[in-house]
Amino acid sequence: MELTRRTFLKLGAAGAATFAINGSLSGAARAMELKLGGKDISRLTRKERQAIPSTCMQCVTACGIIGYVEDDRLVKLEGNPEASNNRGRMCARGQAGVNQVYDPDRILYPMRRVGQRGEGKWKRITWDEALNEITAKLKAVRDGGKPEEFVFHYGRNRMSWILDPFMNAFGSASVGNHTSICEASKFVAQQSMWGPYQDVNDVANAKYILVMGCNPLEAHTVHNALCQRVIDARAAGARMVTFDVRLSNTAARSDRWYPIKPGTDGLVALAMANVIIQNGLYDEEFIETWTNVTVDELKEHLAQFTTEMAARESGVPAADIEKIAVEFATIKPSTVISYRGMVSHYNGMMNERCVMLLEAIAGNIDVKGGRCLKRTGKWANPFGSPKEAKAKIGAVDPKKDYPLAAHKVAQEVLPRIGKGEGKVQVYWTYCINPPYVMPDGNRQMEVLKDEKAIPFHVCSDAYYSENAALADLILPDATYLERYDPETSPSFTIVPFIQVRQAITNPLGESRPTQDVLMELARRLGIGDFLNGIKDSAEYLRKAADATEGLKDVGGWEYIRKVGAWYDKGKKPDYKSYAKELKPEDLKPKSKDERIVVDGKTGTVYKLDKDHPDKYESDKQYVGIRIGGKYYKGFKPYKFPISGKFEIRSALMAKYGFPELPTYIPIPTHQSMKPDELILTTFKVNVHTQSRTQNCKWLTEIHNDNAVWINPVTAAKRGVADGDLVKVTSKVGSMEVRARVTEGIHPGVVAVSFHSGHWQYGRYCSGKKAPAGVGDGEDRHVWWKNFGVLPNLIIPVATDPIGGGQAYMDTVVTVDKTQAGRG
Amino acid sequence: MERVVSPGEVAGQRGGVYGILAQVFLKEMDRALLRTLRAPELASALAELGLDPVDTLGQAPEAQVLEALAVDYAGLFLGPGPHVPPYESVFVGPDAGDGQGSLCGEPAVRMRRLAEEEGLEISPELTAIPDHLAVELEYMQRLASAEAEQWLAGDHAAAAAIREKQRVFLDEHLGRWLPAFVSRVAEASRSSFYRKMAELAGEFTAEDRRLLDDRRPERTTGSDPGPDPDGWPNQC
Amino acid sequence: MADKRFGMVIDLRRCHGCKACQVACKSENDVPLGVWRSWVKEVEQGTYPNVKRHFLPRLCNHCEHPACVRNCPTGASYKRPDGVVLVDRNKCIGCRYCIASCPYQSRFLLADEKVADKCTFCAHRVDQGIVPACVNTCIARARIFGDLNDPNSEVRQLVDSHPVQVLKPEAGQSPSVFYIGADDNAMRGSEAG
């Protein structure tokens, strides 16, 4: 451009005359006020900073946090000392929450795709345009008489308080979740035995901690609360042993790490249960009174699971299994922490049943220091309750194929939609990333790209995920630091608590909490009666707080917005809650249409009413359990109509042709492996959460690239040295990845972490920045250049037939060297 | 011989350039701005600067041009996906490097304070992120206009003070990050319009900084202006 | 009344290498990418299946006899009476002599400002009676901070009642950061993490 000052100013002369007033600055400065932030100054703050308590969402744990604000910006996060679970402490992920708000790649405006789906061309539209389009499409779905053709698929959902009534009012039960790629099989196992899903290991009071297939010091559900109490217990002298395929940090910090063959943990638990039963170390009272089997039945059933059998299958020495069993039964209190590594298998649900059995016979159920039922807080609900929608498409809940998959089968939703199991008109994804988190992402993406299968894809996300890239319309979600929700979490003090999530800073750009979007859509669609006139999530939370039992007596919203959390200070842990005796009024019918009856055989006390007039078929009918002429609360069923006793023998399982007692189910694909085949597992690290923290630069700086962990003997057989590039091949595909030769992994297993290999999600984890390439020489800022691999791409969709969970830990692979040296 | 332009007019013209640039970067082009840029006066001025609006903005019907430009604008400045966020914080401050910084850093805080000092607030269109390129350009436009007013009012000291403000702002803010921003846009651009506008912004700002250093603010060319009818001393 | 003498105890029986401290420090002190004021070193040792992993949180040791202060040509590096070692950015000329002098590689150069930087024990918090950010966030309560000169302080009592170690005692700098339960292998070797 040939430029002179004169030519510039000629432009200016022409422009000055035509320049319109409507620019970026306008008159009358006005202070920006934060909405509803608490004004108290925390004892930890500096004078200039405002402290606002809230709840984290960097993982599912929901720790209480405090956000510090300066110049209308969130500048620091810390744990809230008032929060029962995390007690003022915060993990690396929580600290990086600041990165979530100010991520330069964050989506700040509604965007509409231009060109082909997935082409990557977008234009900005207004919220009005976006909502007009969605309203029109959803109206058409309703008017067509098949509301179930509107599918809402969420990942991390802390807004069920609005989503549930919204979908019910709309009339669609086609709600997909992510649970089966996570805990579904564990949950189903627990529901088949003691009622509610999810457990709380009261490790703070434990003397012996057995860890099977999980990693509480780095991850695990309700991580922070559990982790700090494990450490407290260890500092007080508790013993800890860990079964894992690799040396996780938990295994590294245990007294002993026992490498174990994937999918055999359940068998080891059965062998241990056998040792306990044979040696008379069991809790006779609990078994005989509170379970639906006798000691003799157990002795007979468990006899087949010898320590030799378990040793043969699992690789754990028989003598060690015996020793641990005895320790577990005698060093009390004791408990087993069990999860993903044990559950994400073909036999995952059954493995958890085996561990529950072990806990039961050791007398650890809902006792101090043992495996406790969860206690969560309860919020008032100022909304109305629309009638529960029932209509759903088969793809979202394939009960015909998985009758006991009470938490659905997320990994099969898209594949089934692709096969035509239910017509979809609108597919709305919320905080979920199927191409990345589901198995066989390429298959998931095939369906997402198919406009016949998915005619319209709306995505609510704050970031350009691999899923958002395949949407038609992106709605910019607010981050968790900019929104309102009523919160709670299983309490590790065994006393329920509630917490608030409130905006620490205003939603950046034009982002909007999806909660508020749903509320507006409800009004636009004419289904908003349930809103009871409530405008937005902030108002909902205020009203809820002012009406919540207990909280309302200490100031309701005014209290919790300042303190962040509340629990009943007079309440003590109510261990052995199942043994609580029912009061006479609990046994009286609530109306003249009800009758209370007792099942003579099982002792179940249940009600008959209009909905269920002649038999016990729904958990909603449960009242209690009669034992020895007295009436107790028992183990309150959830979704499955079980008896109210701790069900070791499961009639429900038998009904669907599954083994009725906890047993060992060998994994079919592992029974015919060739000598050079290995098993691929995946794992999580302590600075990331699945797919959605890799845009946090402080975290991705620490963990960006990944490698395949391989045992030295296994590596040597393949001529692989540390740092070599290897090809890992499954029946689905292959990936090239650097080898990390380490003593800390079972020789028959290879492991790859699950946080790398993004091809979207921003500059820090995908290397996709505009322009491509780093600056010359001195780019000291984003200094990492490798972005790793995503193992899920070569893991097939493989569903546990009982629990519905996805088996991420079973994949049979071969590993071959491709290139020496650092690739 | 060139007519000598008065300091007030120069300031006004400088403001005009900033104004146009601010409009271009504020948001997607709308019909009004498109017509403005295609109007003969501006079009010829743009042409002299190498920006042929017929070529750059295309001969296609308005709606098509606007759509194409909106897609370009989004792809460059909004995302989703790889883009060049047009905020000073992304280019200046910890971790900024070659456009890697986080949003709403120190520059954003300081920009809001500067705006508030002038009795201004950030438009909701910019959704309260104060260090957007359009804000900084418009801020310069307003300072230049204010300077022009002071020249007209005959208050040379006040005008000089505002010139100092502009120098400082270019040194500490706009001028600091614009070159890196322009490079990134140049590499990322799919079409030429925004690339050329970014280049124009970069070059003009650099030239403007030099202009602000002149002790004789009325100088617009390299040639000798001769005696000044307004009575300014001849200080060549 | 005696001067305070600030110090830190890191209890490695509790630390599980979660790196909350590493990230909290970054956030609290606006540390740029690529450098850390506090970080966690990891060491793995053993042969399958008897393998262990050890963690060693690292930070400036705020030594009693710091070579960085001694060798600073401008006096930018200085030690406060309460023991905190700091850098005065206005005096620092970026010569990097202090960085080279530190036996623990605790210092680095801030690339934009071209001045030396390191952990400050969060003096801005400590001066207002608040613990450093790393101490505040630690899930394991493995970092304990306080006045070593106060007989009632937790740090004093821990140091008095436990065998403690410092890094590279042979350097003769008398660190103010003490480790309980350290593994010898983790304490040795490269200090750069």
Image (cartoon, coloured by chain):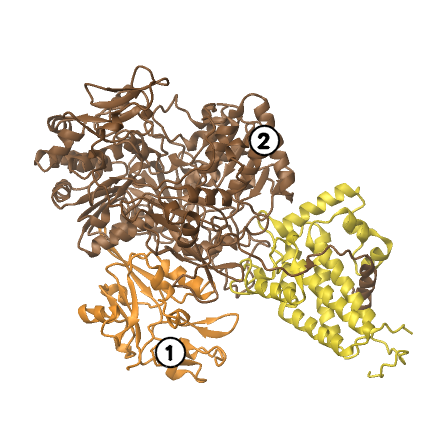
Chain colours: A brown, B yellow, C orange
As drawn, the residue found furthest toward the top would be A614
Q: Which mark is on residue A525?
A: 2
Q: Callout 2: residue from which chain?
A: A
As drawn, the residue found furthest toward the left would be A279
* Left or right of residue B36, residue B74 in this image: left
Of residue A736 and residue C163, the one placed in the foreground of this image is C163
Q: Which mark is on residue C45?
A: none
* Left or right of residue A282, residue A417 in this image: right
Alpha-carbon distance for marks 1 and 2?
70 Å
Q: Residue at x 62, y 50 (%)?
A: B78
Q: Residue at x 38, y 81 (%)?
A: C69
Q: Are labels 1 and 2 on one chain?
A: no
Q: Is residue A822 shown above or below B177?
A: above
Q: x%, y% of residue A543?
A: 46, 42
Q: Is residue A759 shown above or below B222?
A: above
Q: Amino acid at mark 1?
A: Ser
Q: x%, y% of residue A221?
A: 34, 44
Task: Give the number of the mark in front: 1 or 2.
Answer: 2
Q: Tag 2: Cα neighbours inside 10 Å, few (<14), some, or many (≥20)?
A: some
Of residue A153 and residue B198, the one placed in the foreground of this image is A153
Q: Tag 1: Cα neighbours inside 10 Å, few (<14), some, or many (≥20)?
A: some
Q: x%, y% of residue B212?
A: 73, 74
Helix, strand or loop under label 2: helix
